[in-house]
Image (cartoon, rainbow, N blue to C red):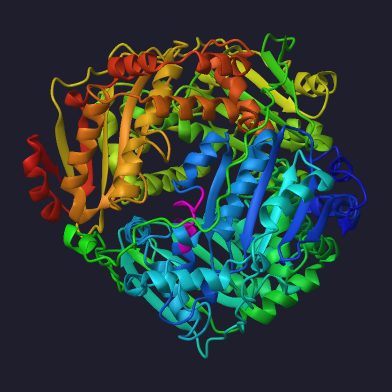
Amino acid sequence: MLKTTKTSLAALAVALAAPAVIAVPAQAQEAAAQDVAPLQNLVDEVAIPYEEFQLENGLTVIVHEDRKAPIVGVAVWYNVGSKDEPKGQTGFAHLFEHLMFNGSENAPNDYFQYLQEMGATDYNGTTNFDRTNYFQTVPTGALERALWLESDRMGYLLGAVTQEKLDNQRGVVQNEKRQGDNQPGGLVFYEIVKTLYPEGHPYDHTPIGSMADLDAASLEDVRNWFRDNYGPNNATLVLAGDISPAEARPLVEKYFGPIARGPVNEPAQAKVTELTEDVRVVMQDQVAAANIAKYWSVPGITDRDLTALTVGANILGGLASSRLDNMLVRDEQIAVGVSAGNFAFQRVGILNLGATVRPGVEIETVEKRLDEIIAQYIAEGPTEDEVRRSATANLASTIRGLEQVGGFGGKAVTLAQGEVLAGDPGFFERQLEILATLTPAEVQAAMKKWMTKPSLTLVLQPGERTGEYEEAASVAASDADEAEAAPGANEITVTKERPAPPISELSDLEFPDVTETTLSNGITVYYAQRDAVPVTRVALSFDAGSAADPLEKRGLEGLTLGLMDEGTTTRTSQELAEAKERLGAVISFGGGSDRSTVTLSSLSANLAPSLELMTDIVRNPAFDQDELERVRTQTVTGIQQSLKSPEGLAFFTISPLIYGSNNAYGAPETVETVQAITREDLIDFKQRWLRPDNADIFVVSDMALSEVMPGLEAAFGNWQAPSVPKGTKAFDNIAKAPESSRIVLVNRPNSPQSYIIGGQITDVDAKDPAIIDLYNANNALGGNFLARLNMNLRETKGWSYGVRGSVNRQENAVSYFVSAPVQADRTGDAMAELIREVDEFVTTRGVTDEELTRIVNNEILQLPGQYETAGAVLSAIQGNVMYDRPMDYQETLAESYRAQTRESLDAAARAAIDPDRFTWVIVGDAEQVRPQLESLGLPVETVQPE
């Protein structure tokens, strides 16, 4: 079955062009919006042509051809999720997501090993209420190997599911649960599900499931679960990318055709529940400000009300210009943030609205206003302009997402989701058709229909944690337990020999040519062309970053960038938000420690008015005093909230210990430093740092340079530098690594996990080309899933959901960090293992031949997928400029990797990393953790968070 739509994505972008003049008064904006082409004309142009066929064993196959790069997105979706789990087997779907990565009969090792051998990118697996999926993007020459791998776990898995693997992955799942539960508000979702879905309803438990059910499951239980749910007739395979249906079919037949059908799985039916009365729940947790959220049970993805509810929620609290944001945050300033969303599952959905209370304001005040605004919205309905802005933003986001063939949200996922959950790969087209014809009256009717029903109001306020917490049982097997395992329970049985096919010749990376030119005022422009989607990305990058902050006013750079989007001399913050939405434009602010960057993502047809909006934001910020106080409050609340999370607290503590408390990289922003910032400081920062003689422009577009330059010249070519001197940064006071290691234990009572982070400053030059040797050495130690640290603490011990080592590269400093969230009762053991692994790696047990081969091959083979998107190209060009690299640097990487040896990687690691000079920070329950650290022989300082 061949399915196509009418024409290309380019036509959509042309149709989305907004009126040239967008700086219209608020009262005229609705009228101006009427000049835009009807949404139906726009939606008709979106296309993902595909061909669908089915094998005799019932496997559904969908192929979409996209020749932009020599890569193919491979996605396998199984039509089983947590809603299909019977009583006593909750969490099985999620557990099997883990087990299916742990090896099959002919690929018995961890699947990440085989994925890295192929040079796969964007690979992972996920489970939700409705489905389980696996995805990877592979070089075209490795597609046959990928199909062999996916078919082996579909048809030949059970012989490789051993008691040892089952026990290990139960431990990993437990730590995944602990990691989520350990976050502020980590118990809220359990309460939502329990309240909205009564016992016995298919959605009455979260996908993580019951640890008691998992602990009670026998090896035969989980094998039967697989037999019942993972046959080819319960699966969909999507191939999107550098392949045609004619090329795909024989390969799919070869590898998946021999797999026998399984039982027919009919996904559980589920009614949309309705509360009999309003429910109000108050919970406490380690949060900086109270949050009020309201939840309604609504229909699932196939109901026509889905689009109306989604658009309605965005207008009310999801868009930057939303009513809740405008009223509660901007005007009345009784909230520091709002949110809204419609989370649609296959059978049911959850509509929610929320507001985070401004510190000092009564919860009841915000809750009352929240209810009043909702009631007013339902009574009056949205305007035509609001509906159009929400739809345009939705369409623009769709276009951007369709640049990618795989990953979490590309074309393969779009087609697979439609087939598995709605029975139609082109389901997205149906949704866009509804979007095109959606009226304010329909939105109002849907909101009135569902939001006038009884709801759950959940208030999460600061205080000692409340709520029922389920601590997972330990499944760490003792030697005695292993001895009692049934004969053969840990042996792999191969039912059919299936040799792995070779990886064919692979294409080298073709990084786009980069052209360097200048505007009339001297700003350098770096341009590259990518035409997969009709989108232009423009990054205006200033040599500033958070390192430009005065020490006594840390946070100044971030506050300055934040205020630039909150009003100009001619537009209010509300008008800016609405203008961006009409254009489908996204303007973001960031850059990190060394650069301050304003980035525009524009539909190319709208580039001229989008650039006009961008230049107004950059060149004419109002820095209004009232807006400053509002954003300051939001920033302070954000700092306070980050210090409630284990990760935030850990990094806040360790940064000054590694870099020095008086260093530009080490001194974190605090409540006190942000409170000290004045409006005059913002103006001074902009004049000294955010100026044309301190800027570069980076562009990646489907348009030719000759088409882009006039807009850039009009926007920035006449911008002149102020008379005040440019700012300067100092990095001469970076701390030295200490002479010996120590531990700082930050007390966070009642934490089910401990967050461990350790690190040191190195002598590595960030601009030294040989730094790639350190990166690849770290890929053996801690840089990816297969690295030693993760394989030890996660895949062998089951004490953590994930452990990483990282080279933290800034323009003027390079540090090395190890991070590990671990179950609290194994903190000391985990610390001992981390110290041992790092020490052995830089002394007696360096990079092995197997590790070198795997790492080098993976780095080379993944290059085409790594630079698939325009965003990745834009980031790479910016990096080339920062680190003084040639513009063809990415194309030289393959040869540099091939030249690496065990000796070169070992030398890089040993020159940079000294485990005897690490500073360790552990965030956890000191009463439980400190006794575990005594045997390590390191000094321990216990501190209380402020």
Q: Is residue 805 visible?
A: yes
- In the foreground, 762 or 826: 826
User: What is the magenta range?
Assistant: 96-106
Q: Is residue 894 above or below residue 379?
A: above
**Residue 483 in magenta stretch:** no
For the N terminus, give its image quadrant: bottom right
Say which quarter of the image contains residue 78. Answer: bottom right
Say which quarter of the image contains residue 171. Answer: bottom left
Q: Position of residue 936 (x, y in %)?
A: 10, 38
Q: Position of residue 458 (x, y in %)?
A: 43, 72
- In the foreground, 897 or 642: 897
How many marks the image carries: the answer is 0
**Relative to 784, is 202 on the left or the right?**
right
Q: Where is residue 280 in the image (x, y as percent from the top left)?
A: 43, 79
Q: In this view, does 583 lie above or below 341?
A: above
Characterize the magenta stretch by its predominant secondary structure. Answer: loop
Q: Is residue 672 visible?
A: no
**x 11%, y 44%: residue:** 933
**Relative to 523, is 773 on the left or the right?**
left
Say which quarter of the image contains residue 326. Answer: bottom right
**Relative to 921, is 796 on the left or the right?**
right
Q: Position of residue 369 (x, y in %)?
A: 52, 69
Q: In this view, does 377 lie above or below 596?
A: below
